[in-house]
Image: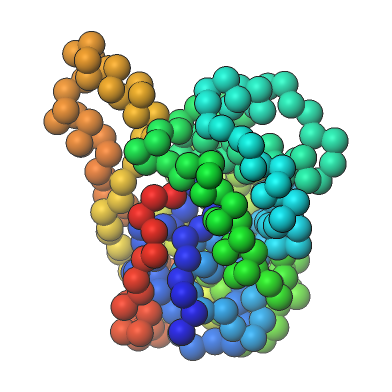
Amino acid sequence: MEKAINSPFRYAGGKFYARHLILEHIPSHSVYLEPFAGGGSIFFAKNKVRQNWLNDADPELINTYLMIQNNPEKLINALSDEVATKERHAWYKNEFKPQNALEQAVRWYYLNRTSYSGIMNPKNCYWGYGDKYSMRPENWGRNILRTSQKLQGVQITCLDFETVLEQVEDDAFLFIDPPYFNADQDKFYSYSFVYDDHIRLSKALKQHQHRIKFLLTYDNSPEIRIMYDWANEIHDKEWNYTINRTDDQKLTQDLKNGIITQKKVQKQTRSKGKEIFILNYTSQQNELFSMYDSQEQFF
């Protein structure tokens, strides 16, 4: 069995803490597609199959994936002397103007690893690095290399989800993790869905449901349940997760100043993830996948 690895990125709304639950429901397959790859937590946690396809609408994210896949050493060398500082973060965010694909990937990777929860939307891309919680710059190279190895032979595209649904092979399995229906997306994502996009996704999946299998994750809302009342199964799921409040310098200062209490910090950093899993097939929990062993806690 392949060694599972963590996503190379920090990603708001990613499925890092739900991996066990999701992997338990994945059926046997030889073609795998993520139309909304994001941080790719499920792809990196499972074994590769005959054909693997990661797609996302964010061109800067996809550029970084492609750089890691095809030119990892160039990216590693460009980041080799970096340090994680608030000043450096501000420079990359506000002043640095990439001149080519490599520089664009350097900027995106640096900001992603040092921003609060990996939020890349310029309006809310804030410094959020802490040595206690974040991957240190000296480990970025190792992270990029192992990610590059996993990405070899993987198809990586920046297309609309309808295009990939039309092109994917019959009998493929799709893990689909679109932006939440009720979330305030403008705060987190550079490329978010509007209501019509959610409708468009439901119609496209219904059109292709007889030739593919999919597991779709959504926030639990009446509108989504109605939208997918034609699906085979809808499961209510809940899991513990940690909010990556990696700006531990601010937390420490707030504690010292009496602005917050230790009890509030603990409550802030532990929470519940509540979503629904929508399947167009009858699931059987896979004990092999449920034995997944995480290789790294910090990300």
Give the image quarter of residue 88.
top right
Q: Between residues 33 and 186, which one lies in front from this camera angle?
A: 33
The extreme right residue here reads 99
| 23 sits left or right of 108 in the view | left
Viewer-side residue, 175 vs 85:
85
Q: Position of residue 233 (x, y in %)?
A: 38, 75
- Against 234, is 107 above or below? above
Is 72 located above or below residue 97 in the figure? below
The coloring applied to the image is rainbow
Viewer-closest of 62 and 135: 135
| In the image: residue 1, left or right of residue 242 | right
Q: Residue at point 56% right, 48% down?
A: 140
Q: Give the residue drawn at x 22%, y 15%.
A: 256
Q: Which residue shows up at 79% across the image and 34% down it? A: 98
Residue 280, relative to residue 262: is it above or below?
below
Tell me where residue 291 sits by quadrant.
bottom left
* Nearer to us in this view, 181 or 33: 33
x%, y% of residue 45? 46, 69
Residue at point 53%, 26% (across, down): 85
Question: With 170 as the anchor, is 239 left or right in this view?
Answer: left
Task: Count the marks.
Answer: 0
- Residue sitting at the far left: 263
Furthest-top residue in view?
A: 257
Residue 146 seen by the camera: yes
Residue 296, percent across and down?
39, 59
